[in-house]
Amino acid sequence: SVKVSDLRVQPEGEQVIGQAAARSGPFSISLVNAKGAVMYSKNETGPLCSIPTRGLSRGLYFINVQTAKEQFAQKIILK
């Protein structure tokens, strides 16, 4: 299964790319704005996912990733 330490998330153009190590498994990923509103949410099977950011306001967001065993949040700034 995917481990949080195996995930890399970064803004790229009009999307945010999430990439897990080759031995990835199912996980859920969401994009939440600074006010706590969920802007995007999807269940993924990995190892690569993208979150569309076109039309979103610039600013601070959080990427939340949850697997069967662990979860984490990472701050990103859309410019």
Image (cartoon, helix red, strand yellow):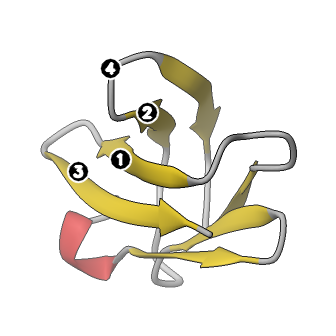
Residue at image location 40% in from the left, 64% down from the top: 76
Marks 2 and 4 sit apart, C-alpha to C-alpha, by 5 Å
**Which residue lies at the image location 48% right of the left edge and 75% below the top edge?**
20
Mark 3–mark 2 distance (CA, rounded to whole Å) = 12 Å
Which labelled disc corresponds to residue 62? 1
Up the image or down, 63 lies above or below 66; here it is below
Q: Are marks 3 and 1 in contact (CB under 8 Å)?
A: yes
Q: In the rendered view, does 75 fall on the left or right side of 26?
A: left
Residue indicated by mark 4: 36
Q: Amino acid at mark 4?
A: Gly
Q: Residue drawn 49% across and 44% down?
A: 26
Mark 3 or mark 1, which has the lower sequence index?
Answer: 1
**Mark 1 vs 2: CB contact within 8 A:** yes
Q: How many marks?
A: 4
- Quarter of the picture containing the N terminus is bottom left
- Residue kind at label 2, given as amino acid type: Asn
Q: Quadrant of residue 40?
A: top right
Q: Secondary structure at mark 2?
A: strand
On screen, residue 13 versus residue 39, left or right, reads right
Residue 73, disc: 3
- Label 3 or label 4, whichever comes before in sequence order: 4
Amino acid residing under circle 1: Phe
Residue 62 % position (x, y) = 35, 47
Mark 4 neighbour class, 10 Å CA radius: few under 14, some 14 to 19, many 20 or more: few
Element type at marker 1?
strand
Q: Residues within 10 Å of mark 3 (few under 14, many from 20)?
A: some
First in sequence: mark 1 vs mark 2: 2
Question: What residue is shown with label 2?
Answer: 33
What element does badge 3 sit on?
strand
Nearest to the observer: residue 59 or residue 67: 59
Which residue is pictured at 49% across the width and 35% down the height?
30
> Disc 3 and disc 4: Cα gap in Å?
12 Å
